[in-house]
Amino acid sequence: MKPPPLYALADCNNFYVSCERVFNPKLEKKPVLVLSNNDGCVVARSNEVKALGIKMGIPYYQCREIAEKHKVEVLSSNYTLYADMSCRVMMTLQQFTPRMEIYSIDEAFLDFARLPISSPTEYAAFIRNTVKKWTGIPISIGIGPTKTLAKLANEIAKHAPEAEGVFDIASRTAEERDALLAKIPASEIWGVGPRLTEKLGLYGVRFIGDLLRQPDDWVKKHLTIAGLRTVWELKGRPCIPLEQLPAARKSLVSSRSFGQPVTELTDLEEAVASYTSGAAERLRGQKLITQFVQVFITTNGYGREPQYANSTICELPRPTAFTPELVKVALRLVRKIYRKGYRYKKAGVLFTGLVPETAQQQNLFVPVADRHQEKVLMKIVDLINARYGADTVKCAAEGLAPGWTMKSDRRSRRFTTRWEDLPVAKT
DNA sequence: TCTGGGGTCCTAGGACCC
DNA sequence: TCTGGGGTCCTAGGACCC
């Protein structure tokens, strides 16, 4: 007999803040927030910061005053550190189930259905303690018969103090579950964002209970097929399967806002060359090659100044991950769309039509031997940059001392991935 | 003054074809 | 005044996620 489906969602609490605290215990119990790239927006908040009413995603300048008043520790994001910590958490979680989906940098779904356990709640509590002990990262775990319900259970686990970080919605009776869902705002549902919340509100649908009372065809009409799946999941009917293998990537983008507005083509060229080079390195890291290169540039959409945004795309004669070729194409594209007289805020490069490097088509006009040389060259460049630090070797087109780089004034050290940055226990 | 980056999926509408 | 119908493919835009 097939056991009934049971999913656990493990979610790291305030993940980036927790990573920082592992290596800087002085931050414990203090208000801490982490900013996005370019020190632009708030992307992680400790509970103390949440209590101050500082909202997720807002631009930092809108909360600087209150942050300074309450002596909030403000940090730039350190993605190298977070990615490595994420890896440790995921490896730990992996010990507890043969079937797991890494959903994001700080979340994983664990299949609990086939495990020889008598109490999912106790098992989850054990997992939670182990992750904390092995990695230093606090997590919460929600358990449910579908992924959407496990997500919701996780929210409950995080906010109900008596839950102690674990909540199992599957073990509740139908009445208990209905009573619980009736009081939760529809905006908390996985897959319901601000737009849909507003739209639902117009129809008087404010709580999950309201939504579950709507007939299927009403849901499909107003929320599309994705919304209908969500509603079925909320009713306990699994529609979103566990994805153990990450889906094949379809696109890869590298884009940045500039620390200061850029007006000159030469600066844009350097930025685009640099993003292209970084994107190409990631492409190779995933053993992919790209068929299309797209470049986009844009002025600051928030400002009142004259606006301009454009993008253009080029199909390559054959898919590749060879940096010099990609940079050459990207530079041609940025020159094509550049217009003098604007203050540019952001540029980016998008690779689409990705295929595995092993699936490469032969091309009559490009000798196989040349391609082999390209591959060897890129491999050596990647090795050097991995060992001696990013940008030890790079294209001249990327510039030497660019003035357009992003702000990152308060970044912590790369404690776990650079020898020079190893934490010092005592000096 | 200051507003992130990197993804996916769905739909509507136009182009095009027979 | 009348002005086909139905299918596919592609793209842009909108919505969501973290």
Image (cartoon, coloured by chain):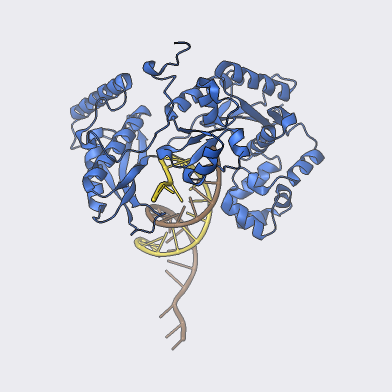
Chain colours: A blue, B yellow, C brown
Tell me where residue A412 appears, x and y as whole percent. Answer: 44, 26
Look at the image and tell me in which quarter the C terminus of chain A lies.
Answer: top left
Instruction: In the rendered view, tell whether residue A256 sits above or below residue A215.
Output: above
Instruction: In the rendered view, tell whether residue A75 sits above or below residue A199.
Output: above
Tell me where residue A309 appears, x and y as whole percent. Answer: 34, 54
Q: How many tags in the picture?
A: 0
Seen at 53% across and 30% down, the residue is A17
Tell me where residue A422 appears, x and y as whole percent. Answer: 42, 16
Q: Nearer the viewer, residue A378 or A16?
A: A16
Is residue A308 in view from this perspective? yes
Seen at 36% across and 36% down, the residue is A355
Tell me where residue A99 appears, x and y as whole percent. Answer: 58, 25
Seen at 42% across and 29% down, the residue is A411
Res A310 → quadrant: bottom left
Res A141 → quadrant: top right
Instruction: In the rendered view, tell whether residue A416 sits above or below residue A398.
Output: above
Residue most toward the front?
A69
Q: Nearer the viewer, residue A44 or C16?
A: A44
Seen at 68% across and 53% down, the residue is A216
Q: Please indicate whether residue A303 sits to the left or right of residue A207 in the image.
A: left
Q: Please indicate whether residue A97 sits to the left or right of residue A337 in the image.
A: right
Residue most toward the top?
A426
Is residue A348 in view from this perspective? no
Look at the image and tell me in which quarter the N terminus of chain A lies.
Answer: top right
Q: Nearer the viewer, residue A263 or A176?
A: A263
Q: Nearer the viewer, residue A338 or A408?
A: A408
